[in-house]
Amino acid sequence: MDLNAQLKTLRREFAENADSRIVDAFSSADAELRTSSVLDGCIKAGDPMPDFSLSDANGDLVSLPRLLSRGPVAISFYRGDWCDFCALELIALAEIYHEILELGASLVAISPQPPQERVRPEFGELPFPMLWDDKAKLARRCGITYSIPVAMRPIYASGGFQPYGLGEAGWSLPIPATYILDRTGIIVLSWLNTNYTCRVEPRDVVTMLSHLHQQSKRELSGPQ
C-alpha cells in the first residue's frame, strides 16, 4: 500500500474515533495554516540547501558536506516520532533505504525533537541517521517552520509533544518537507505541504535519485 493511502486511513480513523471537538480544532488549525504565507518563504527546487552539521542519535555530528561527498542527498523534515503520521513516513523511508544506497545517495531525517525525548525506542533501529535540529534552527533557515496555535498547544501536549525549548520558539514545528539535493548541494526536488497528514511518496524519492544516478553515469562516460 502506498504511504499516502496508509496516511489517509490513519486520518479517517482519527476523525472517526477522536473527540469531535479535537477533530474540529485540528481542522480549524489546518485551514489557518493552509491559508497562511508559510510556503512563500520556503527554499525550493533550484535553491542551495543551507549548510548544516547536526547530531545523530549517538551524538555524532553529520554534516552536509560529508553527505554530499558521497553523492546526492535526500532530506526529510519531520515533526517528531510522537506524530503517528511522521512514524508511518519514517517506516516507509526505511523500506526504500537500501535502494537509496544502491543509487549512491544518502538519506537523513531531521526533527527538532531531542533524541532523549523520543517516545518510540524502536526508531533507534532505523537504518538512516535521525538528526536533531535544535530549536528547529535549520528548519527556520529553510523557511519551513510554523508556530503551533496557542489553542492547540494543550492538545499537542496531551499527545506527547514537548516544547523544544523555552518561549515561543519551543512551539515551532517544520511543515512536512522533503528535499533531494544533487551532489553540488542544489535542490532538484522540493516537496512541501502545510497538511501534516500528507507526505511525499517514497517511490518518488527513488525515482528522482535514479534519474540523478543515470545522469551521473552519462557524465562520467563522456561523449558517445
Image (cartoon, rainbow, N blue to C red):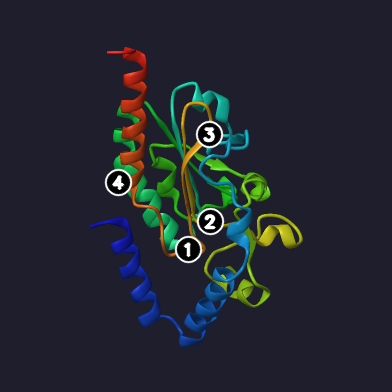
Residue identified by numbered label 1: 196
Decide which of 218, 223 is in the foreground and name it: 223
Residue identified by numbered label 2: 79
Given the image, on which type of amino acid does mark 4 rest? Answer: Arg
Marks 2 and 1 close (CB-CB < 8 Å): yes
Q: What residue sits 35% from the left and 26% below the top?
A: 215
Return the residue found at the far right.
Answer: 167
Residue 4 vertical placement versus 35 (above, below): above
Circle nearer the N terminus (3, 4): 3
Disc 2 residue crowd, few under 14, some 14–19, many 20+, Cα 10 Å? many
User: What distance separates the C-alpha of mark 4 from that of mark 1?
Assistant: 19 Å
Q: Position of residue 28 (x, y in %)?
A: 55, 79
Marks 3 and 4 close (CB-CB < 8 Å): no
Given the image, on which type of amino acid does mark 3 rest? Answer: Ile
- Which numbered marker is on residue 186? 3
User: What distance separates the C-alpha of mark 3 from that of mark 1?
Assistant: 25 Å
User: What distance separates the C-alpha of mark 2 from that of mark 1?
Assistant: 9 Å
Q: Position of residue 88 (x, y in %)?
A: 37, 56
Residue 171 vertical placement versus 43 (above, below): below
- Which numbered marker is on residue 99? none
Marks 3 and 2 close (CB-CB < 8 Å): no
Disc 4 residue crowd, few under 14, some 14–19, many 20+, Cα 10 Å? some
Q: What residue sits 38% from the left and 71% below the top?
A: 11
Given the image, on which type of amino acid does mark 1 rest? Answer: Tyr
Q: Which quadrant, please, contains the C terminus?
A: top left
Decide which of 117, 106 is in the foreground and name it: 106
Residue identified by numbered label 4: 203
User: What distance separates the C-alpha of mark 3 from that of mark 4?
Assistant: 21 Å
Given the image, on which type of amino acid does mark 2 rest? Answer: Arg
